[in-house]
Amino acid sequence: MTDKFILRFVAAVTIFVIAVVVILNRHLIPGPAVAPAFTPYLPMLNAVLNGTCTVLLLTSLYYIKQGNIAVHKKLNIITFCLSSTFLVSYILFHYLMRNDTFYGDANFDGILSDSERAAVGGMRTLYLSILIPHIVLAAGVLPLILLSFYRGLQMQVEKHRKLVRFTFPIWLFVTVTGVIVYLMIKPYYHF
């Protein structure tokens, strides 16, 4: 496969995934009238997947620093598969859920009243200051992950190293903040 093909493929996958997420977040495709019973467990699953990816990324870094390419590669394949599972679960959750969840919406009516906003105070600002970069970087890191993964599998070591200098810290930030965002929003989920 040529670099041109890979770059086009990565761009197509990235655009497709971002478009699907935006469409589902805007509820442009209606989900089922009643969500399946497993739906409330998807955010927790996503947090577990993110947390596991965090540990795997750090472990993978350890092994490559030790020169153990075989373990590094296996860990990254597992991390890539778990991140892909996360993405499917995330998309599924946003398809199945009809109502949005808002930080501070204590009465679960989908509206953040002035009293609810006052009750959470600066915590909502903190939540949003974590959530917004998490979302932006999650979208931005997708093509970097795909390219880094491909370069690593092809043993294009120098190209892989150059990409991973950017990919690793962003991917790590996204997995860590994914868990934090879940823990912060969890009390406001209403199923």
Image (tube, rainbow, N blue to C red):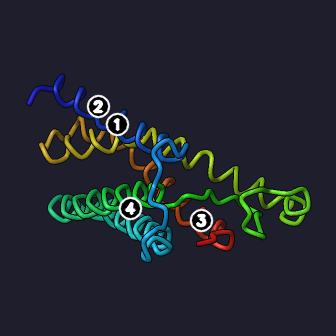
Question: Between marks 3 and 2, how big is the CA–CA gap?
Answer: 30 Å
State the residue position of label 4.
89
Hey, what amino acid is under mark 1?
Answer: Phe
State the residue position of label 2.
12
The numbered mark, 3 or 2, whose residue comes first in the sequence reads: 2
Q: Are marks 4 and 1 in contact (CB under 8 Å)?
A: no
The numbered mark, 1 or 3, whose residue comes first in the sequence reads: 1
Q: Looking at the rendering, in which quadrant would you find the N terminus?
A: top left
Taking the view exactly as shown, the residue that stands out farthest to the top is 4
Q: Residues within 10 Å of mark 1 (few under 14, many from 20)?
A: few
Residue, x 32% and y 36% (percent of image)? Answer: 162
Q: Are marks 1 and 2 in contact (CB under 8 Å)?
A: yes
Question: Between marks 2 and 4, how big is the CA–CA gap?
Answer: 20 Å
Residue 124 location (% of width, % of height): 77, 57
Residue 114 location (% of width, % of height): 90, 56
Question: Between marks 3 and 4, how big is the CA–CA gap?
Answer: 18 Å
